[in-house]
Image (cartoon, coloured by chain):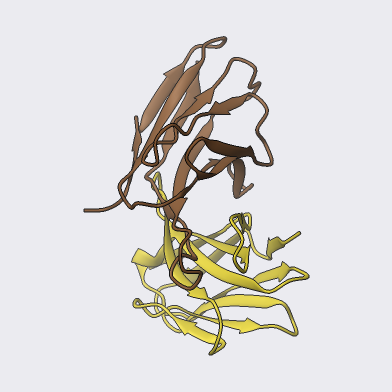
Amino acid sequence: DGGITQSPKYLFRKEGQNVTLSCEQNLNHDAMYWYRQDPGQGLRLIYYSQIVNDFQKGDIAEGYSVSREKKESFPLTVTSAQKNPTAFYLCASRGTGSVSMNTEAFFGQGTRLTVV
Amino acid sequence: AQSVTQLDSQVPVFEEAPVELRCNYSSSVSVYLFWYVQYPNQGLQLLLKYLSGSTLVKSINGFEAEFNKSQTSFHLRKPSVHISDTAEYFCAVSKTGGFKTIFGAGTRLFVKA
């Protein structure tokens, strides 16, 4: 079945450590996104990528980094510079072909990161 | 730039009662509008979308939303809710042909027996 897989589902990190969240899709989508979700704040865009080897900062990119070396993969690294990393992280993808066929984002099941 | 306002953070309702979740957006350009649903500790799933044409759009599980351009609204309604509809609902907007989707803060729907 086509879809987006995020791993791990739960992740614990000690303060000062970097951690990488995985996101893989087999939908053949060009565009991929990372969102952060905090209670009462909806989804905030961290980074997005429209095509392989290219990505742009979203609204809250500080303390995060990404790479897009393969179309299927868009890993997110939460660095020690992120002051409040505890949150639910969601990865999404979207097609970019025919405008009428590629309008909505498809989401993974999320990774809950907790700093201990 | 686009923005989305969901007017209610929480909506409690009894089973089999009607419900309306309100969403207003702002944009100076043509947009697509979406409603997504999120169950606890899961990702978002598309509920319904408005792209063009008929202003009333429906989902397979009884929800419907109406695009009102003059009031810049896209309210979600269901005539009779079930316990299983308890979830968080997000309204979202994207510029026609754009890459970014802007989400509202979400509305938690609690359906009580």
Is B10 rendered above or below residue A8? below
Q: Is residue A85 visible?
A: no
User: Residue lying farthest left?
Assistant: A1
Q: Nearer the viewer, residue B52 or B93?
A: B52
Identity of the residue drawn at 61% across and 63% down: B94
Identity of the residue drawn at 75% across and 68% down: B26
Q: Give left or right: position of A109 versus A42.
A: left
Q: Nearer the viewer, residue A3 or B90?
A: A3
Is B51 rendered above or below residue A2? below
Identity of the residue drawn at 53% across and 68% down: B34
At which x and y percent is residue A66?
Answer: 53, 29
Identity of the residue drawn at 64% across and 71% down: B31
At which x and y percent is residue A108?
Answer: 38, 46
At which x and y percent is residue A29?
Answer: 40, 52
At which x and y percent is residue A79?
Answer: 57, 18
Q: Nearer the viewer, residue A60 or B65?
A: A60
Q: Which chain is the one coloured yellow?
A: B
Is A74 rendered above or below residue B26? above
Q: Which chain is the one coloured brown?
A: A
Q: Is residue B52 visible?
A: yes
In this rendering, the count of numbered labels is: 0
